[in-house]
Amino acid sequence: MKTMITAAAAVACLAAFCDEREDRLRDLTNICAFIPSDNLDAAVPEPTPDEIIVKYHVTTNTVIEDLKEIVRRSDITETDFYAKVPRQSAVSFIGQYGGTNDLPYLHTIMTNSSDYAQHAAIGACISILHESSMLMDLAREIVTNSSVYSGGLRGWTYSILIGMCSQGESDSYIDNPAQHARIAAFFLERAAVEEDDILFIDRCACRLNPWYRHSQQRRDNLAALRPPDLTGRPAELYDAAQADAAQDD
């Protein structure tokens, strides 16, 4: 009889645990589904998983696992804009609350070009690595793989990196000279090989490495990467960049 009572109590505790988790997942899903109002006069504070931590007295790790459960339960083939939001937001929140141990999980989403949360997964990985030397390896993986990452995602990655070095101009700015130096070196590296958006990379390389602007290295890079048969406004812009590079300091 005692054994039966103990087993019944265990079942009851398990049921209560499951009920509480479902309640927690429901509340967390609602947070992930939140869409800020376009009306600034009627705007309300954006909810975060911190509310779940406080309300249910759980750890950050528990919230991360719950976020992954929301991702797991979502339909990767979803086409409705609003129905996509919880999965995308859950992935983004993993980047805000997670750590390097979560990178393999996020990488699986990030490398799936059919997953509508790919963009969010890239942002989440960058968020986790924003002050790590590993960020450059991640960025290099993205910008060099046109079969997995669209031109828009590759360009967005470059924009985030330059934003990290742009105080007062970007929400992604970080006050980390060591990371700034790594990003500056990364843009120099890409200025020698990037073909998709040559002039943007060229401007970033000059901005982060002032010595590069009138260097022979820049002149050589621009000459080597100039697209053939360039005409019109694009040709004018390229001519201007090459003329600027040819000037003496």
Image (cartoon, rainbow, N blue to C red):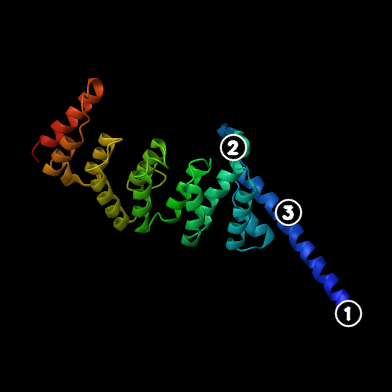
**Is the N terminus in the top left, top right, bottom left or bottom right quadrant?**
bottom right
User: Taking the image as drawn, is residue 241 in sight?
Assistant: yes
Q: Residue at x 14, y 44 (%)?
A: 217
Q: Is residue 114 left or right of residue 177?
A: right
Residue depicted at 20% across the width and 32% down the height: 226
Q: Alpha carbon of mark 2 to alpha carbon of mark 3: how far?
A: 26 Å
Circles 1, 3 touching at the beta carbon (< 8 Å): no
| Mark 1 vs mark 3, CA separation in Å | 32 Å
Determine contact: label 1, label 2, CB under 8 Å.
no
Res 23 label:
3
Amino acid tagged 1: Lys
Q: Which residue is mark 2?
A: 43
Residue 109 against residue 57 in the figure, above or below: above
- For the C terminus, the image quarter is top left
Quick one: label 3, few (<14), some, or many (20+) residues within 10 Å? few
Three-letter code for the amino acid on which mark 3 is drawn: Asp
